[in-house]
Amino acid sequence: MLVNLTPHILSVHAGSDVPVAISPSGFLARVAVTLTPCGTIEGFPLVSRSYGDVTGLPDPIEGTTYVVSAMVLEALKGSRPDVVAPGDSVRVDGVIVGCRGFAINK
C-alpha cells in the first residue's frame, strides 16, 4: 500500500495511457532546513543549506510504503527502506504534471 505524505495529488504515469492518482493522506512528512549565509555570488546572497530532523513520518508498517518529497527522502539518507519520493518527472509545456514512478535513496 502506498501512503502519500505530501500535500499534493500524485499523478503516476507508468505503464499505461491513464495515470494513477494517489491522493494525499492528510498527514505530511517534513524536514527542517537551516539556511546559513556564507557569502555572495556576483552580488547575490549565498547560503549553505543543512537538513535537520524529519517530522510527520510514521513508524514502518509491513506492506506500507510512504511517498514523501525528494527533500525528505534526501534528509533520511537511506535510513528508511519503506520511503520513496516521486521519480522521473512528466512535463507538459515545461510544467510538471506527474511522475513515471518512484525513487529511493541508498
Image: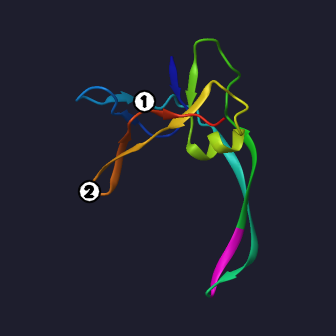
Residue 10 position by quadrant: top left
Tell me: residue 39, above or below residue 84.
Answer: below
For the C terminus, the image quarter is: top right
Crowd rating for badge 1 (residues with CA inside 10 Å; few <14, some 14–19, many 20+) = some
Q: Which amino acid does label 1 sit on?
A: Ser
Q: Which mark is residue 23?
A: 1
Crowd rating for badge 2 (residues with CA inside 10 Å; few <14, some 14–19, many 20+) = few
Q: In terms of sequence position, does the residue under pointer 1 or pointer 2 come before the other?
A: 1
* Separation (CA) of disc 1 from disc 2: 24 Å
Q: Is residue 9 magenta?
A: no
Residue 18, position as x, y percentages in the image: 25, 28
Q: Which of 102 and 31 is in front in this view?
A: 102
Residue 16, position as x, y percentages in the image: 26, 26
Q: What element carries label 1?
A: loop
22 with respect to 91 (left or right): right
Tell me the residue at 70%/34% (across/down): 78
Residue depth check, mark 1 versus mark 2: number of the one nearer the observer: 2
Q: How many marks?
A: 2
Q: Residue 91 carries which label?
A: none
Q: Which mark is residue 93?
A: 2
In the image, farthest residue toward the front: 106
